[in-house]
């Protein structure tokens, strides 16, 4: 049944480098402490390991420990859990964003734009298709980190989605781009944009300030938290989205195109 509100919980952690047990245990504590509605809980990119270029030792199959943990959390708390993991399938490695529902159904999106600057393209296989999840009448377009720099991949044609959701390990030195592009994606696509990042420093010396953010369909800042770990739920409102799109019907004037893999 369609609902007016959508409740999204953003978790901005300090990820322990390549330590799955420590990270999953920490998330479990954070999720257990959430008060109020648990509807969609969002973890960052490669949430169990950090942004590692060592898939040979860290990758899991689709029935691996991290995905089983996600499924357990979804069932236990009757929520949807999402975030990306290093997944091995058909002898290839993917930076895969999972959408795990309490009924056992699992959807996924494989990161399309691999971050060649860090060598991601040498270790992982790019995805070829978008994935738009559905929850109570809300449509959510799943994206991963570097995808944010490529607006055509996220373009909202024919109002096909309501929320654009990015998970990331986006470093401090490019935080201006992170915040600016998230806001731009909201404005140009007339949608809510949610970006979930991490804090801390990884084994390569990259510092992360988080800046996990939520922007409204007119680009208004609804949430933005820097430097600290946090777990916070925000309510999105369908009537606000529809009012913005009706009052300013910019999407109807957009160029039409077809995405070719």
Image (cartoon, rainbow, N blue to C red):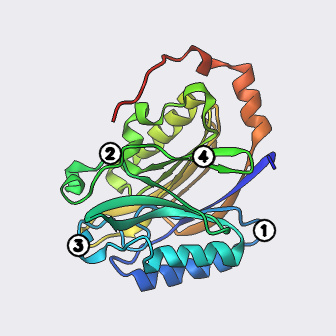
Outermost residue on the top side: it is 253
Which marked residue is nearer to the observer: mark 2 or mark 1?
Answer: 2
Q: Which residue is mark 4?
A: 140
Image-quadrant location for residue 207: bottom left
Residue appearing at x 76%, y 36% in the figure: 240
Q: Quick one: label 3 or label 1, which is nearer the N terminus?
A: 1
Residue 251: image quadrant is: top right
**Which numbered disc, 4 or 1, marks the residue that appears first in the sequence?**
1
Horizontal relation, residue 27 to residue 90: left or right: right
**Residue 202: % across, % down:** 31, 70
Q: In the drawing, what numbered circle is on residue 168? A: none
Label 2 sits on a secondary structure element that is loop
Question: Mark 4 falls on what kind of element?
Answer: strand
Classify 184 as above or below 73: above
Residue at numbered disc 3: 56
Up-down: is 16 above or below 135? below
- Check disc 1 and report the residue beneath it: 36
| Residue neighbourhood size for the residue with mark 1, other residues' Cα within 10 Å, grouped as few (<14), some (14–19), many (≥20) | few
Q: Nearer the viewer, mark 3 or mark 2?
A: 3
**Looking at the image, which is closer to me, 59 or 50?**
59
In the rendered structure, the answer to whether residue 82 lies left or right of residue 206 reads: right
């Amino acid at each position: 049944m369609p609902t007016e509100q959508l409740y999204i919980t953003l978790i901005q952690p300090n990820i322990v480098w390549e330590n799955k047990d420590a990270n999953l245990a920490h998330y479990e504590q954070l999720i257990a402490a959430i008060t109020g509605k648990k509807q969609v809980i969002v973890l960052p990119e490669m949430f169990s390991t950090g942004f590692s270029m060592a898939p040979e030792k860290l990758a899991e199959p689709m029935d691996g420990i991290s995905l089983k943990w996600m499924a357990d959390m979804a069932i236990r708390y009757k929520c949807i859990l999402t975030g990306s993991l290093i997944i091995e399938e058909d002898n290839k490695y993917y930076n895969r964003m999972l959408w795990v529902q309490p009924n056992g159904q699992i959807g996924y999106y494989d990161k399309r734009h691999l971050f060649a600057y860090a060598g991601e393209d040498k270790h992982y296989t790019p995805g070829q298709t978008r994935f738009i999840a559905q929850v109570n009448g809300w449509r959510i377009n799943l994206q991963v980190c570097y995808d944010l720099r490529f607006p055509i991949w996220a373009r909202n044609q024919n109002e096909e989605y309501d929320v654009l959701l990015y998970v990331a390990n986006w470093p401090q030195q490019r935080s201006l781009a992170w915040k600016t592009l998230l806001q731009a994606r909201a404005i140009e696509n007339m949608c809510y944009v949610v970006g979930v990042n991490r804090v801390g420093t990884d084994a390569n010396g990259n510092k992360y300030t988080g800046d996990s953010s939520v922007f409204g369909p007119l680009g208004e800042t609804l949430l933005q938290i820097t430097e600290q770990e946090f777990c916070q739920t925000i309510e999105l409102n369908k009537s606000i989205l529809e009012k913005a799109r009706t009052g300013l019907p910019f999407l109807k004037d957009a160029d039409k195109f077809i995405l070719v893999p």
